[in-house]
Image (tube, rainbow, N blue to C red):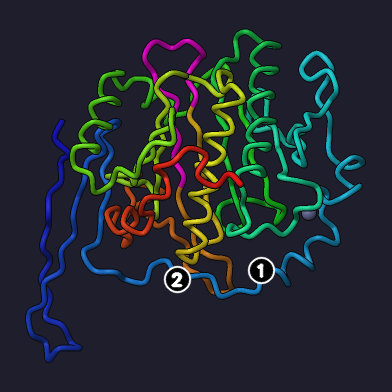
Amino acid sequence: MELTRRVLRAGVLDPNKDFTLQETEVEIRWDPLTGHTARVLGVPRGLMPPNDEDLEAIAGKTAESCPFCGDRLEARTPRFPPDVVTEGRIHRGQAVLFPNLFAYSRFSAVSVYGPELHYLPLAQMTWELVSDNLATQAAFARAATASDPAAQWASINANHMLPSGSSLFHPHLQGSVDPVPTTMQRLLVDTPADRFRAYLEAEQDAGERYLGSTGRVHWLASFAPLAPGELRALMFDVASPVDLDDDLVQELGGGIATALNLYAELGFESFNLALYGAPPGSDGYPLNLRMACRSNLKAMYRADATYFERLHWEAAVDIAPEELASRAGERFCRPNASAP
Ligand SMILES: [Zn+2]
């Protein structure tokens, strides 16, 4: 497989350089799976400044009325009906999963890393915290798909911190189980299974964006990202979050924690994540994940979603995927990378 790119050159007479001709490069890249295009800007533009906000202070203010904090979680979050989840909520380690009060899907779940973890900077994400939270979501996906055989499209997702779309400060994951795929699930499932393998092999050969394998999970810096700092994970022996066994939950959770620690090093505190499931048993479909950084929380911030991202479905990023991979180094090359 050839990874396709094309460089465009734009010339302007620059007022900051006596109106002499200055050229800028913009690289268009085609995603090898879905064909969507991305723009990688040739010169860093400072589009994603590092966090300089006192998040602990904001955490302190928002915790006072947070429905996910401490004992309030028990009293103020809903429970699933017993025909979906017998105990009403799902617990694993510190993590607790409950239904979203305002549904976005046939089955919508919210899972906190812990009722006491209202302030959880990305540098403090651990293998155990992420794995336990992921385990509640896998259990939820199994329960929801079992309770309604028509609803087999499961995904595990995150809006982390307010700029990513989260309405609450308290860190959490979100699960969705539906009788129909989202647009991206449909595009991914319509991708021939052998293209996923060919993409991985092309990146393993190229080397500059392949980050390594932790065993059953391969990690990549996205060739044509949908958003800044995008990482992808591919798992070839499972198709749905329903199929995540305990070992794979631990391995994937370790990889996600490693990625979040990397984001913290790069100065980011807000991210989105999606683990795109197909119906369990979908032939050849690899369960796959995307995660990407969002703008940091601050007054007068610049949103990272512009007309390009929202209306053309095409990211314009100034973090080159190769630079991201270089910063990641070898950390995704070992099993349970962030395990204690
Ligand atoms: Zn809270």
Tag on residue 49? 2
Residue 137 picture location, percent across and down: 65, 30
Closer to us: 167 or 275: 275
Mark seen at residue 249: none
Is-magenta flag for residue 231?
A: no
Mark 1: few/some/many CA within 10 Å (<14, 14-19, 20+): some
Q: Residue at x 48, y 37 (%)?
A: 335
Image quadrant of ligand 1 equals bottom right
Q: At x 11% / y 77%, what residue is drawn?
A: 22
Going by the numbered disc 1, the residue's amino acid type is: Leu
- Residue drawn 62% across and 8% down? 149
Quadrant position of the N terminus in the picture: top left
Q: Which residue is mark 1?
A: 55
Highlighted magenta segment, given as a residue range:
277-291
Instruction: Left or right? Give the position of 279 relative to 128.
Output: left
Examine the image and state in which quarter residue 24 appears: bottom left
- How would you rate the neighbour count of disc 2 (Cα within 10 Å): few for under 14, some for 14-19, many for 20 or more? some
What secondary structure is the stretch in magenta mostly built from?
loop
Q: Is residue 290 magenta?
A: yes
On the image, which quarter does residue 99 sit in? top right
Front-lying residue, 152 or 21? 152
Q: Earlier in the sequence, mark 1 or mark 2?
A: 2
The spot of residue 177 in percent (x, y) is 61, 23
The one of 14 and 250 positioned closer to us in this rendering: 250
**Looking at the picture, how far across and down is residue 237, in whole percent?**
43, 18
Q: Which amino acid, mark 2?
A: Pro
Depth order, front residue of 197/180: 197
Relative to 16, 248 lies left or right: right
Query: Does residue 252 lie above or below 162 as drawn?
Result: above
